[in-house]
Amino acid sequence: MEKIVILTGAGISAESGLGTFRGAGGLWENHRVEDVATPEAFARDPKLVTTFYNQRRAGAATARPNAAHAALATLQRDYDGEVIIVTQNVDGLHEAAGAEVLHMHGQLDQALCAACGHQWPAPMEMQVGEVCPSCGGGFGRPDIVWFGEMPYHMDEIFEHLVTCGLFAAIGTSGQVYPAAGFVREADAAGAHTIELNLDPSSVVSQFAETRFGPATQTVPDWVKGLLG
Ligand code: APR
């Protein structure tokens, strides 16, 4: 069976109680990106940034996967072909549902040494100057890909995009690149493309098919159709 590539965003975790970024009451309504999500912000005020991600880590730790996460895990297990899930999310809800995913924007439960690049499981409460267990330097930071930084796994992701037969985007606003450009890559390679979202994204016109509604309704129905 043809390979399926699925991109997920904050919308798939919204019904698990984790806020999105740009919706009403979203994270970027209460925090300026320039203050908490750039390497410059971390250099300028590491306490503010460390606290922001400690709060998000605590929130994600109590959240539970929902029916949309579960449906994708089922698809990955039961589909008679490859199902590659690429997420922009930094929570661990896909894995908690039993799926394997590529975290292109990093993970809340991981720390990164800004000096040697070592990655290790993040304590729930990271400290400013968190000590790296590999080089011993105090340059630990949240392992989150900030604006202006290169996302993870890009070569592997592009390889999958140009060799898949079906590309789906779930719960993402299509406002942040390179993720928002994936549909164009997959479409150009001949894949069928579908957007599943609460409302139309900024790149909705580039999709061959759309389904609107809460992910916990649209995703299980879509997966049921694929598994027949
Ligand atoms: N079901 C389906 N979709 C939903 C739901 C839901 N219950 N709730 C919200 N959505 C949709 C919204 O309509 C919106 O289009 O999810 C999308 C969330 O968009 P954003 O908040 O912009 O989140 P996302 O697209 O994941 O952001 C991309 O931007 O801030 C950076 O690095 C951060 O990974 C993030 C990236």
Image (cartoon, grey):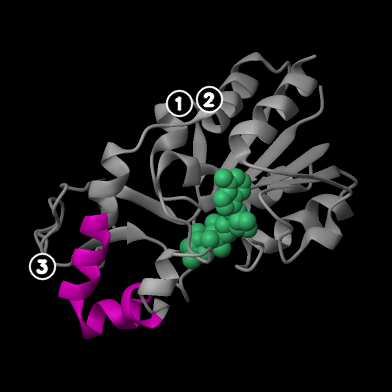
Residue 187: give x, y in percent of width and height.
86, 52
What's the magenta region?
34-55
* Residue type at tag 2: Ala
Residue 121: give x, y in percent of width and height.
23, 43
Which residue is depicted at the point 72% across and 62% down?
181
Relative height, residue 47 to residue 100 (above, below): below
Asked whether residue 115 is drawn in magenta, I would say no
* Label 2: how many Cα within 10 Å (few below 14, some 14–19, many 20+): many
- Image position of 101 (left or right of 46): right
Label total for image:
3
Which residue is depicted at the point 43% across and 39% down?
16
Check whether the beta carbons of the residues at disc 3 and disc 1 lie within 8 A of each other.
Answer: no
* Secondary structure of residue under mark 2: helix
Check whether the beta carbons of the residues at disc 1 and disc 2 lie within 8 A of each other.
Answer: yes
Query: Disc 1 or 2, which lies upstream in sequence?
Result: 2
Q: Mark 3 to mark 2: distance in Å? A: 37 Å
Which residue was labeled with disc 3?
Answer: 129
Which residue is depicted at the point 68% across and 52% down?
158
Nearer to us of marks 3 and 2 is 2
Which residue was labeled with disc 2?
Answer: 70
Answer with the quadrant where ligand 1 appears in the image. bottom right
